[in-house]
Image (tube, grey):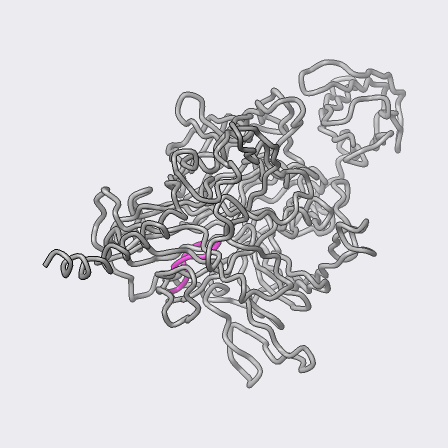
């Protein structure tokens, strides 16, 4: 009898052991970053340390020939005394129409230099965008040219914040200077009650990042353990082998057995991910993938919930998905699988997790969902009605622009540079001037053999046409316009845009040889002068491409500036300094009827240089080649006139 019972129980025991062994691949709990609410945010960028595989040392794992459990030097954002992040930053929760104030300091070590905080996806005044011009020097607060304070005018959406310092964005973001922002509007959001919105209960941030490490040999008894000591985080860190979710590898997320909202952000410096939710990590039949329901993209809600078996998300993109875990239990583990085997070669890609300690996981899965959360969540269902209305209005477009994504001889990585319209990034050059509150049509053509995620600051745009390879689909290039996707379907060669391109976007992957056209209205916050320091960026969001010059800048100005009805600064008794950034010389242009003084100081107020200048009408020059590089303040005083301007020395 005992033998019979044992035989009957053996398959169950083996099944449990098998489940335990598979689950052991995902042994690090995934936590949501702490959230910060309110209207005043005080935080700092600083050096810290984190373990990216914190539970590894507690497990008796086979093949534990590499130790990724050690504390690794990082960078992060924290609100002093409130959050204790070792990597990334807290999730900021903003409410529409709130007026926000920020106290942000650069507490990074001097070796890290300056930093910025860019509000990716947010419509802001140019001097608060946090791009390369708004640098925060070491030991200083962000208060130049102004302290950031703005009103939230954007709709409900998921955006993010990250460093955008010139030429070193890759390094600082890779080390941890990034975080999610949730824009909410509980009173006026018609979908508030029907969508999961309880942060870290049924509404989870999923920040995906690739990661690589540098190793050293550590002797432990008779064993030599290859131990991680630092991140691969230079400005060309390569395509890294590990995948982190919210800062941990081989992670599992505890979710309620209810409808759950997953806010995906691809915060990687290079990789795109093509993912599916599967009940096992090697499933190849798309029909067996679990449905995800797309409800929002970069700029907010889609018009309805779209059932999707797979999702392609490129660097900088956000997508909000609903996944229904109703009726499931802790043994019903699901996996987020990276379908790398289906990705075209022009898209920068890579495995899910690997190589060690457990080698690459089967099917390249890089996280698990375990439906056993003790937190109570309401019972909701996937909405079937309209979520929003996003009509595309093609009229009133005042200008069209054409941009070619290219590369110089050899391409980046072989001595060349990535380019836009043949130009590399120059902070002293304005590439486009846009009149505020006007609508423009931009066409982006990718002439390279690599897919580029195109991102533009300030605006959320609507894609109106896409020609060529799209998503992971490839076409017969010998047949022109085989796939021409459009907002309408007026002809046989036109197909409707896929759901993930029908909402508002600020970041779209443009495949090799493909063309994407969008319209955008450049609402609010026009500047009163054309000045390079007021520049907004557009660039490839593969950060290594951005840092290697695939970026241009535009300004948004009031109509009277562009139409010439506004007086020039020089005729107003003021002056213009150029170029900016500058090298060895600054030119002062204007009209001064009496002698004056130019005083140059650093951001601490220390005088670096002071010169007397005779009265002039035209241009005079000041040598600055002997001054330290960085931001300087140039003060011109003549009689009762006193003007200060910020200049970047490179």
In the image, residue 204 sits, relative to residue 136, either above or below, namely below
Residue 18 in view (yes/no) = yes
* Residue 167 place in picture, x, y as percent: 70, 39
* Residue 412 place in picture, x, y as percent: 75, 51
Q: Which residues are magenta?
A: 295-304
In this figure, what is the number of numbered marks?
0
Decide which of 158, 398 is in the foreground and name it: 158
* Residue at the image point whose x is 54% and y is 42% from the top: 124
**In the shown orientation, is residue 532 left or right of residue 275?**
right
Residue that extends furthest to the bottom in the rendered view of this protein? 492
Decide which of 289, 357 is in the foreground and name it: 357
Decide which of 268, 69 is in the foreground and name it: 69
* Residue at the image point whose x is 51% and y is 27% from the top: 221
User: Residue 580 is drawn in which quadrant?
Assistant: top right
User: Residue 245 is drawn in which quadrant?
Assistant: top left
Residue 398 in view (yes/no) = no
* Residue 623 place in picture, x, y as percent: 88, 25
* Residue at the image point whose x is 62% and y is 39% from the top: 232
**In the shown orientation, is residue 221 left or right of residue 292?**
right
**In the shown orientation, is residue 261 left or right of residue 258?**
right
User: Residue 28 is drawn in which quadrant?
Assistant: top left
Reply yes or no: does residue 296 show up in magenta. Answer: yes
């Amino acid at each position: 009898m005992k033998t019979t019972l044992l035989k009957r129980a053996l398959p169950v025991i083996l099944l449990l052991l098998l489940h335990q062994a598979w689950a052991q691949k995902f042994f690090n709990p995934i936590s949501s970053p702490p959230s910060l609410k309110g209207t005043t945010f005080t935080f700092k960028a600083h050096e810290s340390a984190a373990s990216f595989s914190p539970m590894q040392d507690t497990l008796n794992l086979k093949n534990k020939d590499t130790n990724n459990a050690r504390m690794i030097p990082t960078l992060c954002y924290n609100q002093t005394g409130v959050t204790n992040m070792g990597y990334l930053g807290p999730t900021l929760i903003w409410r529409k129409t709130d007026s926000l104030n920020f106290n942000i300091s650069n507490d990074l070590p001097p070796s890290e230099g300056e930093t910025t905080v860019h509000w990716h996806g947010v419509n802001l005044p140019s001097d608060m965008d946090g791009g390369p011009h708004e640098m925060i020097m070491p030991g200083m607060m962000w208060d130049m040219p102004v302290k950031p304070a703005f009103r939230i005018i954007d709709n409900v959406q998921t955006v993010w914040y990250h460093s955008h310092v010139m030429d070193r964005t890759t390094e600082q973001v890779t080390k941890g200077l990034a975080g999610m922002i949730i824009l909410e509007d509980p009173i006026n959001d018609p979908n508030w009650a029907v969508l999961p919105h309880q942060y870290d209960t049924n509404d989870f941030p999923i920040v995906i990042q690739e990661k690589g490490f540098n190793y050293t040999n550590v002797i432990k008894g008779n064993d030599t353990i290859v131990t991680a000591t630092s991140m691969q985080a230079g400005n060309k860190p390569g395509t890294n082998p590990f995948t982190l979710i919210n800062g941990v590898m081989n992670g599992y997320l505890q979710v309620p057995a209810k409808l759950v909202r997953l806010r995906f952000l691809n915060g990687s410096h290079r990789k795109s991910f093509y993912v599916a939710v599967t009940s096992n990590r090697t499933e190849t039949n798309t029909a067996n993938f679990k449905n995800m329901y797309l409800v929002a993209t970069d700029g907010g809600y889609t018009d309805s919930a779209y059932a999707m078996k797979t999702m392609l998300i490129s660097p900088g993109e956000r997508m909000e998905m609903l996944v229904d875990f109703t009726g499931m239990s802790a043994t019903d583990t699901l996996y987020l699988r990276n379908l790398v085997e289906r990705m075209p070669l022009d898209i920068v890609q890579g495995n899910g997790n690997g190589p060690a300690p457990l080698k690459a996981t089967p099917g390249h899965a890089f996280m698990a969902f375990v439906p056993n959360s003790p937190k109570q969540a309401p019972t909701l269902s996937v909405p079937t009605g309209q979520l929003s209305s996003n009509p595309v209005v093609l009229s009133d477009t005042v200008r069209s622009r054409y941009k070619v994504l290219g590369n110089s001889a050899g391409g980046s990585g072989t001595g060349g540079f990535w380019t836009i319209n043949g130009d590399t990034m120059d902070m002293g050059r304005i590439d486009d001037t846009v009149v505020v509150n006007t609508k423009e049509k931009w066409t982006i053509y990718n002439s390279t053999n690599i897919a580029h995620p195109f991102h533009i600051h300030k605006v959320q745009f609507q894609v109106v046409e896409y020609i060529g390879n799209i998503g992971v689909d490839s076409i017969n290039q010998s047949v022109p316009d085989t796939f021409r996707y459009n907002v309408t379907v007026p002809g046989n060669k036109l197909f409707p845009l896929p759901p993930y391109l029908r909402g508002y976007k600020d970041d779209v992957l443009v495949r090799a040889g493909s063309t994407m056209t969008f319209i955008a209205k450049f609402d609010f916050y026009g500047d009163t002068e054309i000045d390079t320091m007021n520049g907004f960026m557009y660039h490839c969001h593969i950060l290594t491409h951005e840092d290697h010059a695939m970026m241009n800048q535009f300004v948004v100005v009031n109509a009277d500036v562009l139409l010439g009805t506004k007086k020039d600064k020089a005729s107003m008794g003021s002056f213009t300094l150029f170029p900016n950034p500058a090298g060895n010389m600054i030119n002062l242009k204007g009209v001064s009827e009496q002698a004056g003084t130019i005083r140059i100081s650093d951001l601490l107020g220390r005088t670096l240089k002071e010169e007397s200048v005779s009265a002039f009408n035209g241009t005079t020059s000041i040598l600055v080649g002997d001054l330290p590089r960085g931001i300087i303040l140039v003060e011109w005083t003549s009689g009762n006139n006193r003007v200060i301007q910020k200049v970047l020395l490179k």
